[in-house]
Amino acid sequence: MLLPQQKMQLSAYSDLYALIIPKDNLLRKINELIDFTFIYDELVNNYCLNNGRNAESPIRMFKYLLLKTIYTISDVDVVERSRYDMSFKYFLEMAPEDAVINSSSLTKFRKLRLKDTDLLNLLINKTVSISIEKGIITSKSLIVDATHSLSRSNPYSALEVLRERSKLLRKVVYAVDENMKERFPEKNASGELEKELAYCKELEKCIESDQTLSLIPAVKEKLNLLKETVEDTQENYILSKDTDAKTGHKSADSKFFGYKTHLAMTEERIITAAVVTSGEKGDGPELPMLVKISQNNGIQVDTVIGDSAYSGKENLKLKDKDDQNIKIVAKLNPAIAQGSRKNEDKFDYNKDADMFVCPAGHLAIRKARQGKKERGKNQVDTYYFDVEKCKTCPLRDGCYKPGAKTKTYSVSIKSSLHQEQIVFQESEYYKEKSKHRYKIEAKNSELKNVHGYDRAIAYGINSMQMQGALAIFTVNLKRILKLTI
């Protein structure tokens, strides 16, 4: 049963917050900036209002998840820290003496209460609304890019992951007490997973037997991480395969297994739209959706700034769509500024690898150009795929002809839109706007390096969207606070 919206309970100790929490504390400033009742309104229908035990406030549960993202810590550690960190308790609107939740409640909250909730757009819309209300956003330009996140399914074997986690734990322990080396069990030198699991369990017991050592926050965090990995490995004997993640390409020789988050951001560095896809998807096709979401969130758009992945024909047509006259500040690449090609909705161009990707996610292995410039017919780039993969591909019907020795895909590289864009690229407006593109690369770096967005923390695209929602909400709030000081 969900009670009416929960507020901080009055307590004889509540005055401690005014004494302990500085005015410039990040969590205090976030509480003062935003009214979180929109979370209650969004989730209230996911609760029973008149039956069962009293449920924890959805606002408080959401704030626990937000704290996890702000400080990049586990479920166990965010709950533990909220037990003694007064800034956490203040942010969670708890009385100083209030008890904290069980960390398992966060898993239930994510799976049961946030299910079927478009948290990504909800949180972005809220921060954009605050930015507009405060007069922060004045530009009409969107800077676009995509950033990749590795799947939780580690590309290493379970044995390698266990060894890395135990190594990190030992390193933290040695920084506290180097004499623990003598007490630790002998490391497993074999390649047997069962022996590595046994070693990790012995290591856990050894550290937990020293109550003083095991309660040190840095040690406890790494210990909890190793425990989770051991439990996951025992259940599956290999790290679970993330069925929603796909292999994408950062270059012709570099690939990753995971997801892509396509972002749109204003020149003031407020993210206005995001779309999460599997890793093999191209960047360019997501632009119309990013523009539409940004406009729905109240942003006026007259210019889009991006790299060459966004200079495809369909994107160049945005200037004529509904008389929007949206200018595309993106350097032309002949491979995507084509006049015409077949199956445009199936084959995506990967600008990093400078190759096309087939519907099954396979990257072309080479390309060749046919024809000569200014000689009658348009020049054509022909992309060649690995025919051995085509022979066994589940999508081969209608794509690969049985017995064929090659599988190719051809692209014409000349169009009237192409010619118009060449002229636009020489304008002062284009050159000035293109200088802003670096801003989104810095934002991607903040998401990954500060808020853990370089790797998924759970399995499935829905979990990736939830992780993205909280990370983007966090960086937007921090940016708003910085611009309103």
Image (spheres, grey):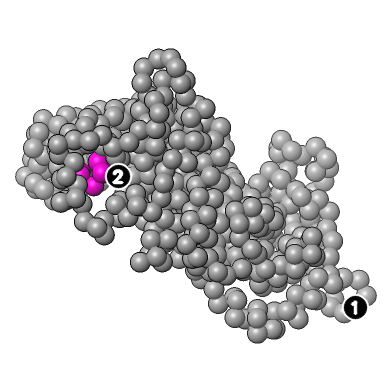
Indicate left or right for 332 with 125 as reference. right
Can you see residue 449?
Answer: no
Q: Residue furthest right?
A: 376
- Spot occupied by residue 121 in the image (x, y as percentages of width and height): 56, 46
- Give left or right: position of 168 versus 5: left
- Disc 1 or 2, which lies upstream in sequence? 2
Look at the picture and state if 357 lies above or below 40: below
Q: Secondary structure at mark 1?
A: loop
Q: For the stretch drawn in magenta, what is the main secondary structure?
A: helix
x then y, percent, for residue 252: 59, 60
Q: In the rendered structure, which amino acid carries the disc numbered 1?
A: Arg
Number of numbered markers: 2
Label 1 and label 2: CA atoms lie apart by 69 Å
Magenta stretch bounds: 84-90
Which secondary structure, mark 2? helix
Residue position for label 1: 375
Amino acid of disc 2: Phe
| Residue at x 74%, y 52% (from the top left corner) | 347
Q: Is residue 341 inside the magenta stretch? A: no
Residue at 79 percent of width and 64 percent of height: 323
Q: Residue at x 59, y 49 (%)?
A: 275
Q: Quadrant of the C terminus?
A: bottom left
Which residue matches tag 2?
91
